[in-house]
Image (tube, rainbow, N blue to C red):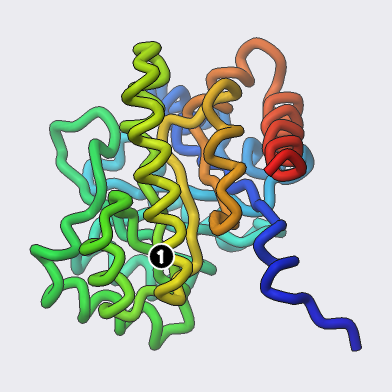
Amino acid sequence: MTTISQADELKVLRLGVNIDHVATIRNARGGRHPDPLRAAHIAIEGGADGITAHLREDRRHISDSDIARLKAELTRPLNLEMAATDEMMAIALRHVPNACCLVPERREERTTEGGLDVLGAQSHLKGVVDRLKQAGIRVSLFIEADLRAIEASAKLGADIVELHTGAYCERALEDDVAGVSHELARLKIGAENAHAAGLEVHAGHGLTYNTVKAVARLPQIVELNIGHFLVGEAIFGGLTAAVQHMRALMAQARREA
């Protein structure tokens, strides 16, 4: 029987496509179009390895019925992004997605603004992580690439950490060369530390065609989660083409690493 070495496993880089903002467009007009489930199927046809959806407290994009339909029909893993609340816990335990990514959430924010405060909420998060894992759900924590947050995530028993790439992407948009270098170094050290702590390492937030390759070259990262940019590009060339192009850039970066 052929076995895959740890080194070979680290060469694999998966793409999770977040379909939240297909629902944002739908909700702007009401009704059922465009359908996030249809977008999920198209993303998978284009090469997505999984689908991510964030069910927010205010239901600003993804709805409860979207989660039910995604869970019932997807042919790839569903990653449910959620706040660590009793309401979201009940929904996760009802649908049992492949994974739950615990994220910070504030009603007034436009999008997730930073990593989860793992250090300040350890006692609460421990109970959430344990209950999800007992249900057979993989648990991911969306965090900054900070050593203390990584150590706390491992201590809590998380399976995965998803490193927040937002600061790196912002520095890239500003053409801040020194800032980009600093943030990439921080992500590199974070990925190395998380992997050494026994955590599976993902990354995401704000990644584009222009910024993805530098993150994709980090060998400890095995999954990137990308949504808003791909949905935006889909307006101009279709979601299949957007996913395929992103996958091609990721693969090229991995070969170059």
Percent position of residue 24, x then y: 41, 28
Q: Is residue 38 above or below residue 95?
A: above
Q: Residue placed farthest to the right in the image?
A: 1
Quadrant placement of the C terminus = top right
Between 208 and 94, the one nearer to me in the picture = 208
Helix, strand or loop under label 1? helix
The residue positioned 71% from the left and 57% from the top of the image is 11
Percent position of residue 163, x then y: 39, 50
Q: Residue placed farthest to the left in the image?
A: 120
Is residue 42 visible to us here? no
The residue positioned 32% from the left and 51% from the top of the image is 145
Percent position of residue 222, x then y: 59, 57
Label 1, residues with CA under 10 Å away: few <14, some 14-19, many ≥20? many
Q: Is residue 137 above or below residue 87?
A: below
Q: Is residue 146 above or below residue 84?
A: above
The residue positioned 8% from the left and 63% from the top of the image is 120
Is residue 111 visible to us here? yes
Percent position of residue 21, x then y: 45, 30
Quadrant placement of the N terminus = bottom right
Quarter of the image for residue 241 reads top right
Label 1 belongs to which residue? Answer: 194
- Residue type at mark 1? Ala
The residue positioned 54% from the left and 19% from the top of the image is 232
